């Protein structure tokens, strides 16, 4: 079988999740043609999908052995380094791609996420300043400020994101946009609740639940906002409804949100009734 046909066969194996077969085919191909960058890139992708630490390190070795590396190879290297726990290395690698391709939005988003993980807020703000003022980057700015503890700035950014989103999407005409807008509303609601602006938080949770009525997390968080506002009856109703029929994992995750607030007396009676 010719090398091109064997490569297509390996791609087919990967597409259908047959990783062992894909790896065996690529191993054979690279034994015969060790300079085949396409095969080496694909083998790195297969090893990355296998997810074990040894496979991830082998994927890095494949990328390092490429004869003609491309910026996309560095993006893949960044993902692998992060999976191995080397967040600093992942961020430095993503920064290298951004320097080589300053207009690459995919690279910029990856670099931003890694800067946020490293809590390098000033560098993240500099990156954001170079991005277009569109709803998803405005939301990223809100996420940054919320993480940095500046909730008023976060609320302002999320509000701007919602305004820009509404300029581009009609959620009634485009149902796929409903969860996207709900996500923006939920993000602003969380920032408002952290600031003690519970009325704004509840209004945003109401609006989000109108878009995604089955979102247990939104319902639970609306209950917590009601508790913060001093409405224990609504708080208990919402939180119980969110927990009802949830999986053990879902219930544990929601209750963990409540436990994180137990340093505030207003939430303690609710915790007693829900635990």
Image (cartoon, rainbow, N blue to C red):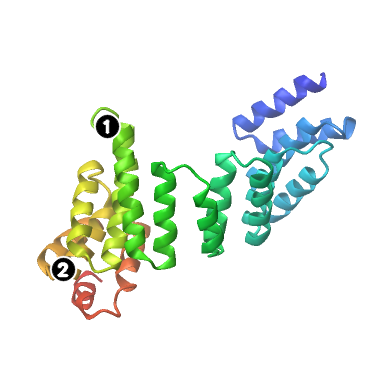
The quadrant where residue 163 appears: top left
Q: Is residue 209 left or right of residue 8?
A: left
Q: Nearer the viewer, residue 144 or 54?
A: 144
**Helix, strand or loop at mark 1:** loop
- Residue 170's label in the rendered image is 1
From the image, tell me which residue sits under label 2.
Answer: 229
Q: Say which of 160 and 91 sits in front.
A: 160
Answer with the quarter of the image where residue 87 lies: bottom right
Image: 268 above or below 188: below
Near mark 2 (Cα within 10 A), the count class, few <14, some 14-19 or many ≥20, is some
Calculate the distance from the C-alpha at mark 1 to the C-alpha at mark 2.
32 Å
Residue at image point 80% right, 46% down: 64
- Of tags 1 and 2, the one toward the viewer is 1
Percent position of residue 32, x then y: 89, 30
Q: Position of residue 220 (x, y in %)?
A: 25, 59
Q: Which mark is residue 250?
A: none
Q: Please tell me which of labels 1 and 2 falls first in the chain.
A: 1
Which one is in front, 7 or 63?
63
- Residue sitting nearer the eye, 158 or 12: 158
Q: Residue visible at 39% across and 49% down?
A: 139
SS of the residue at dot 2?
Answer: helix
């Amino acid at each position: 079988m010719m090398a091109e046909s064997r490569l297509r066969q390996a791609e087919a194996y990967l597409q259908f999740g047959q990783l062992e077969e894909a790896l065996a085919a690529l191993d054979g191909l690279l034994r015969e043609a060790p300079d085949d960058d396409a095969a080496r890139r694909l083998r790195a992708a297969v090893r990355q999908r296998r997810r074990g630490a040894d496979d991830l390190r082998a994927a890095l070795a494949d990328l390092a052995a490429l004869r003609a590396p491309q910026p996309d190879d560095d993006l893949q290297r960044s993902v692998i380094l992060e999976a191995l726990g080397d967040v600093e290395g992942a961020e430095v690698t993503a920064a290298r791609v951004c320097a080589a391709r300053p207009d690459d939005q995919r690279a910029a988003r990856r670099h931003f996420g890694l800067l946020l993980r490293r809590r390098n807020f000033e560098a993240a703000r500099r990156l954001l300043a170079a991005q277009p003022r569109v709803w998803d980057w405005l939301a990223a700015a809100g996420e940054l400020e919320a993480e940095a503890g500046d909730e008023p700035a976060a609320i302002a950014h999320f509000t701007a994101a919602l305004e820009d989103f509404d300029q581009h999407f009609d959620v009634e005409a485009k149902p796929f946009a409903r969860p996207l807008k709900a996500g923006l509303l939920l993000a602003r609601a969380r920032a408002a609740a952290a600031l003690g602006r519970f009325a704004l938080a509840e209004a945003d949770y109401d609006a989000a639940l109108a878009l995604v009525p089955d979102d247990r997390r939104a319902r639970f968080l609306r209950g917590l906002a009601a508790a913060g506002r001093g409405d224990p009856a609504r708080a208990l109703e919402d939180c119980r409804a969110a927990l009802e029929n949830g999986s053990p994992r879902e219930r544990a995750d929601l209750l963990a949100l409540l436990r994180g607030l137990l340093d505030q007396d207003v939430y303690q009676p609710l915790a007693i009734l829900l635990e």
